[in-house]
């Protein structure tokens, strides 16, 4: 079995995430793509991240209906920072005969050499990067055998821009799946910090504590 692991904050998940996952699925003949929302991303220790429950719910809504896409809450169960190495190890232990691919954007590849024990990650999974050879910086020196390029649909969209638009009350149409847009509107995510309601109970925004790099 060939399995793609797609970790990220998914705050919120958007069409760029889905297109990268679909391109990787086709390019690499993946049987499954597991979206893994991060618990406490070490590289975002000084930024506010929406509550885990909200990000998990949005990710489930985003992939709903795709037969090969699934969502795992593996990183949300523990306390402390989420390290990619620990996550990959856990999945490999569950399916030792599977071949794993770690999905990421070219920007993440640039920083990969700073992650926690990157060579150990490479021993367990092949990096599947959204982009084209030559687009990366330091990460591109890992060696062609451990990095595959899955192409890039060329859509310039980011979770940060979507949060800004939601905060301003602007349309999210065509940026996120409709179900995700409705969830954001219903729970007033990315607006001013709520004083009550679902968003407050889930902690619509939670400032992540200081943590080590991934």
Image (cartoon, helix red, strand yellow):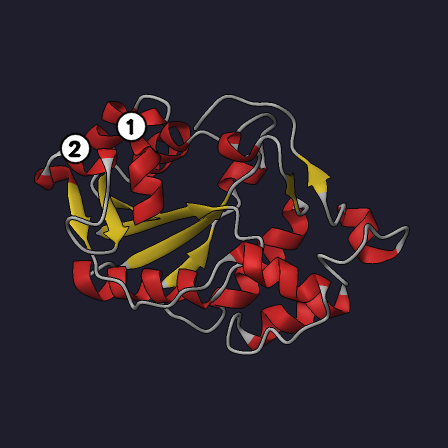
Query: Looking at the rendering, in which quadrant would you find the C terminus?
Result: top left
Q: Which mark is residue 142?
A: 2
Residue at x 28%, y 26% (from the top left corner): 118
| Residue 2 marker | none
Q: Using the numbered discs, state the Cα–Cα distance from disc 1 to disc 2 in whole angstroms.
A: 9 Å
Viewer-nearest residue: 187 or 108: 108
**Left or right of residue 125: residue 205:** right
Instruction: Classify 45 as above or below 33.
Output: above
Q: Are marks 1 and 2 in contact (CB under 8 Å)?
A: yes
Give neighbour class at mark 1: few <14, some 14-19, many 20+ (Cα, 10 Å). Answer: some
- The residue where tag 1 is placed is 113
- Residue at figure coordinates x 53%, y 45% from the top left: 73
Is residue 98 rendered to the left or right of residue 111?
A: left
The one nearer the camera, 108 or 177, is: 108
| Residue under the image location 81 percent in, 56 percent down | 198
Rendering quarter of residue 84:
top left
Q: Nearer the viewer, residue 121 or 78?
A: 121
Compare marks 1 and 2 and give the one earlier in the sequence: 1
Q: Is residue 5 above or below residue 96?
A: below
Is residue 210 positioned above or below 94 on the image?
above
Q: How many marks?
A: 2
Query: Residue 203: x and y, percent?
Result: 76, 45
Q: Where does the image place residue 166, in percent across and percent down from the top left? A: 68, 65
Secondary structure beneath label 2: helix
Label 1 sits on a secondary structure element that is helix
- Residue 12 x %, y %: 57, 57
């Amino acid at each position: 079995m060939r399995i793609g692991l797609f970790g990220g904050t998914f705050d919120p998940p958007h069409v760029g995430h889905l297109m990268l996952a679909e391109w990787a699925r086709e390019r690499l003949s993946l049987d499954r793509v597991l979206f893994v929302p991060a618990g406490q991303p070490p590289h975002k220790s000084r930024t506010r991240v929406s509550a885990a429950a909200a990000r998990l719910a949005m990710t489930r809504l985003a992939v709903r209906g795709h037969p090969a896409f699934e969502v795992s809450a593996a990183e949300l169960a523990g306390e402390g920072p989420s390290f990619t190495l620990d996550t990959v190890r856990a999945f490999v232990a569950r399916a030792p005969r599977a071949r794993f691919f770690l999905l990421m954007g070219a920007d993440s590849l640039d920083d990969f050499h700073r992650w926690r024990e990157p060579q150990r990650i490479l021993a367990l999974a092949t990096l599947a990067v959204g982009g084209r050879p030559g687009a990366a910086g330091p990460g591109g020196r890992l060696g062609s055998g451990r990095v595959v390029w899955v192409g890039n649909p060329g859509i310039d969209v980011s979770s940060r821009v979507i949060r800004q638009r939601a905060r301003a009350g602007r349309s999210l149409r065509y940026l996120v799946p409709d179900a995700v847009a409705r969830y954001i509107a219903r729970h007033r995510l990315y607006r001013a910090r709520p004083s009550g309601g679902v968003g407050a109970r889930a902690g619509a925004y939670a400032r992540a504590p200081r943590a080590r790099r991934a």
